[in-house]
Amino acid sequence: MPSIKFADVEFPDHNTPSPYSIWRHSMPSIFAQKLWKQKLVAALAAADAGPSASDLVNAPALNHWRAFVTPKGSPFLFGMVSGHPRLGSRWITTSQLVGINPTHGWARTASRWYQLSCPFADLEAKVARGLGVSDAGPDFLQVGMPGCPSLDDMTKLSLLLSAWRNRILQADGDRHV
């Protein structure tokens, strides 16, 4: 199967990737795709500016989070959310990730800000220690999204987000897949 390389990370090529193509089945109209693209562009601008104090105070918290990448190259987060306005408190996958700063404890997706708590790697390490395993690496706990590789390397995630950002901003609003 051919692959696409984004920021030194190879992903399977499932047709031509588009920043909003993963939504084509749930949003069939061109109008809806244009609205989604506008939402992504606005989210990018928000991520560039960074969150305000009130953005984070009002944001749901995401604990035990891990980044994943769809087959089309779209990054997203998986984790245990609390305080989500629509989803409450449970394990979720977020909408498309457009910015993240784990050091400052935030992530921006297409739809909202998240306060980041402990990454999933911390949970893995804790479980491994509890089981007496000293050399547990990434994916010690098998939590997978079918067809979506995890991406724990923040340098690679940053490169992928940069490439993803360029794709969003360069996408022709009149074209869709």
Image (tube, grey):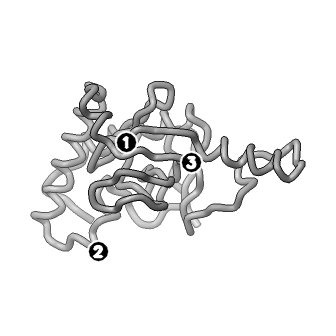
Residue 122, by quadrant, is: top right
Q: Amino acid at mark 1?
A: Tyr
Left/right of residue 124 with respect to residue 63 in the rendered view: right
Could you tell me the amino acid type at mark 3?
His
Residue 15: image location, x then y, percent: 41, 66
Residue 174 screen position, x and y as percent: 13, 56
Q: Nearer the viewer, residue 151 or 83?
A: 83
Real-space Cα distance between discs 2 and 1?
Answer: 26 Å
| Residue 42 x %, y % | 19, 40
Residue corresponding to mark 3: 64
User: Horizontal placement of 105 versus 11: left or right?
Assistant: left
The residue at the point 33 percent across, 53 percent down is 84
Secondary structure under the numbered disc 2 in the rendered image: loop
Residue 152 drawn above or below residue 52 = below
47 w.r.t. 3: above or below: above
Residue identifier under label 1: 114
Label 1, label 3: how far apart the Cα atoms are? 13 Å
**Nearer the observer, 28 or 12:** 28
- The answer to which of marks 1 and 3 sits earlier in the sequence is 3
Residue 157 bears which disc, if any?
none
In this rendering, which labeled residue sits more in front, label 2 or label 1?
A: 1
Q: Please name the residue shown 63% across and 61% down the image.
A: 143
- Give the labeled residue for mark 2: 25
Mark 3: few, some, or many residues within 10 Å (few <14, many ≥20)?
some
For the C terminus, the image quarter is bottom left
Residues at badges 1 and 3 in contact (C-beta under 8 Å)?
no
Residue at screen point 59% across, 52% down: 150
